[in-house]
Image (cartoon, rainbow, N blue to C red):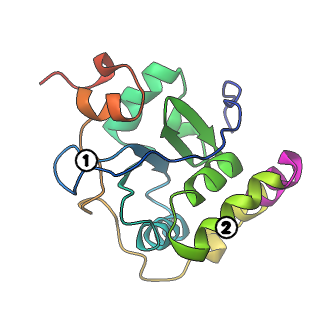
């Protein structure tokens, strides 16, 4: 696994109010994940199916052009990592920090998964690594690809960057 810069401090997970409707450029958060991993694809589908209606998470694979562009900004080689990454409110979270922050976007009782932030980080990370190291054995057949999903981010626009708290100039200009 590659070395990466320190993870940002944990946030409170407070979410802003209403989101834009589904359409070109919607979203206020981005999940980068291993789109080649069936377990990861199933996990992302599970998350999107349980997300609050006012939440519009975007998704992208670690090996995508969008991830490369973001990697230049954060100085991280995302394709060489085997982590999940979550970007929102100008914060980059990884692994278990990303998981509990993503849980704050969930509807109903599922949002209580965000209580994972109360578990000491070393224990959360060991658990995350255990699951991550065994994810290919945990995968089930039939976890279809997510490229082309309505939440898949094809390009990084300045407007999307602003909604995620990123500098708009890292977005595609054309």
At which x and y percent is residue 19? 32, 50
Q: Which residues are magenta?
A: 119-128
- Quick check: 164 left or right of 100? left
> 150 or 75: nearer the eye?
150
Mark 1 element type: loop
At which x and y percent is residue 154? 24, 45
At which x and y percent is residue 58? 36, 51
The mark found on residue 112 in the picture is 2
Q: Is residue 102 above or below residue 97?
A: below
- Looking at the image, which residue is at 21% across and 43% down? 25
Residue 124 is drawn in which quadrant?
Answer: bottom right
Residue lying at the far bottom in this picture: please name it. 141
How far is disc 2 from disc 1 in space, using C-alphas?
25 Å
> 112 or 150: nearer the eye?
112
Mark 2 and mark 1 residues within 8 Å of each other at the beta carbon: no
- Quick check: 150 left or right of 47? left
In this figure, what is the number of numbered marks?
Answer: 2
> 119 or 156: nearer the eye?
119
Q: Quadrant of the C terminus?
A: top left
- Look at discs 2 and 1 and give the one toward the viewer: 2
Residue 113 is drawn in which quadrant?
Answer: bottom right
Residue lying at the far left in this picture: please name it. 174
- Looking at the image, which residue is at 44% across and 21% down? 72
Look at the image and say whether residue 122 sits in the magenta stretch. yes
- Label 1: which residue? 26
Q: Residues within 10 Å of mark 1 (few under 14, many from 20)?
A: some
């Amino acid at each position: 696994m590659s070395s990466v810069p320190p993870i940002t401090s944990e946030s409170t997970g407070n979410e802003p109010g209403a989101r834009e409707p589904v359409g070109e450029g919607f979203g206020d958060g981005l999940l980068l994940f291993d789109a080649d991993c069936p377990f990861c694809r199933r996990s992302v589908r599970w998350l999107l199916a349980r997300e609050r209606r006012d939440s519009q998470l975007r998704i992208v694979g670690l090996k995508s052009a969008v991830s490369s562009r973001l990697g230049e900004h954060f100085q991280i080689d995302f394709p060489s990592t085997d982590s999940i990454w979550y970007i929102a409110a100008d914060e980059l979270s990884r692994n278990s920090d990303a998981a509990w922050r993503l849980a704050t976007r969930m509807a109903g009782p599922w949002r209580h998964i965000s209580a994972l932030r109360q578990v000491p980080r070393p224990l959360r990370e060991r658990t995350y690594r255990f699951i991550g190291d065994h994810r290919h054995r945990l995968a089930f057949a039939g976890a279809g690809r997510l490229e082309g999903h309505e939440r898949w981010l094809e390009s990084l626009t300045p407007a999307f960057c602003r909604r995620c708290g990123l500098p708009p100039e890292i977005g595609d200009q054309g």
